[in-house]
Image: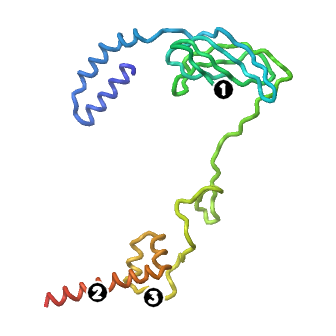
């Protein structure tokens, strides 16, 4: 980590919890030169490129060379290839190529995909080679219901699935007394609907109301 970035992180930590961060910054300043000297220094260099002909699929451009230790990925004309490392500096990578030839941009990238170095390479043309199939952008289809609410894409699983339930209050007030409707209003719509549409839910609501009424009567009796 760069000293300026590390200093900002330590100051943020100190402001958050009041910790003493000066010793850590001093240790990092003294240790940084020794650590940097132990990192192998190597420039980005391409030592070999060759086209590998394949039947039934696009050809491959095999490139090899050396790169800094921070370089972990390689990209040819915005298409990332399969790379392998022979030691701390030497690497080899394969990239699919079409029938066209000419100069191509080869980039060395770090872990996050940021460019570390670049170089131009010559690609030999082969008119009879297959073209690289175009890749369509990936996206997730989202279904929008008629009322404007968003739902899962076709084939996806909704967060809650169940039987159809009534959206409006029941037309049978004798089955759901006023107290039960108030109790249902404090629950989620799915839970309330499930209670309304099950005999067990109705019985549970009636028993809870009976218990509340009994406790109220006992309290009034004790007050007298």
Q: Residues within 10 Å of mark 3 (few under 14, many from 20)?
A: few
Q: Tell me the quadrant of the picture where the N terminus can be found.
A: top left
Q: Is residue 206 left or right of residue 49?
A: left
Which corner quadrant holds the C terminus? bottom left
Disc 1 element: loop
SS for callout 2:
helix
Instruction: Between label 2 and label 1, give the one nearer the viewer.
Output: 2
- In the displayed structure, 57 sits above or below 148; it is above
Q: CA distance from mark 3 to mark 2?
A: 17 Å
Pointer 2 and pointer 1: residues touching (CB < 8 Å)?
no
Residue with the mark numbered 3: 175
Residue 204 location in percent, x, y?
39, 80
The numbered dot on residue 213 is: 2
Q: Residues within 10 Å of mark 2 (few under 14, many from 20)?
A: few
- In the foreground, 148 or 155: 155
| Badge number at residue 78 | 1
């Amino acid at each position: 980590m760069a000293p300026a970035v590390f200093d900002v992180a330590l100051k943020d930590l100190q402001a958050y919890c009041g910790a003493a961060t000066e010793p850590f910054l001093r240790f990092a300043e003294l240790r940084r030169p020794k650590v940097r000297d132990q990192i192998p220094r190597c420039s980005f260099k391409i030592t070999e490129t060759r086209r590998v002909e394949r039947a039934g699929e696009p050809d491959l451009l095999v490139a090899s060379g050396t790169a800094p230790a921070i370089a972990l990925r390689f990209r040819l004309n915005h298409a990332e290839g399969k790379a392998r490392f022979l030691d701390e500096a030497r690497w080899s990578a394969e990239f699919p190529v079409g029938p066209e030839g000419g100069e191509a941009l080869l980039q060395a990238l770090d872990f996050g995909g940021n460019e570390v170095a670049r170089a131009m390479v010559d690609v030999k043309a082969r008119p009879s080679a297959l073209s690289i199939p175009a890749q369509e952008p990936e996206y997730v289809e989202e279904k929008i219901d008629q009322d404007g609410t968003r739902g899962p894409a076709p084939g996806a699983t909704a967060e809650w699935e169940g039987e159809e339930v009534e959206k409006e209050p029941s037309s049978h007030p004798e089955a759901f007394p006023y107290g039960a409707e108030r109790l249902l209003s404090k629950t989620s719509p799915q839970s309330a609907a499930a209670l309304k549409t099950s005999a067990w839910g109705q019985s549970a609501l009636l028993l809870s109301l009976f218990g509340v009424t009994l406790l109220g009567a006992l309290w009034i009796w004790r007050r007298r």
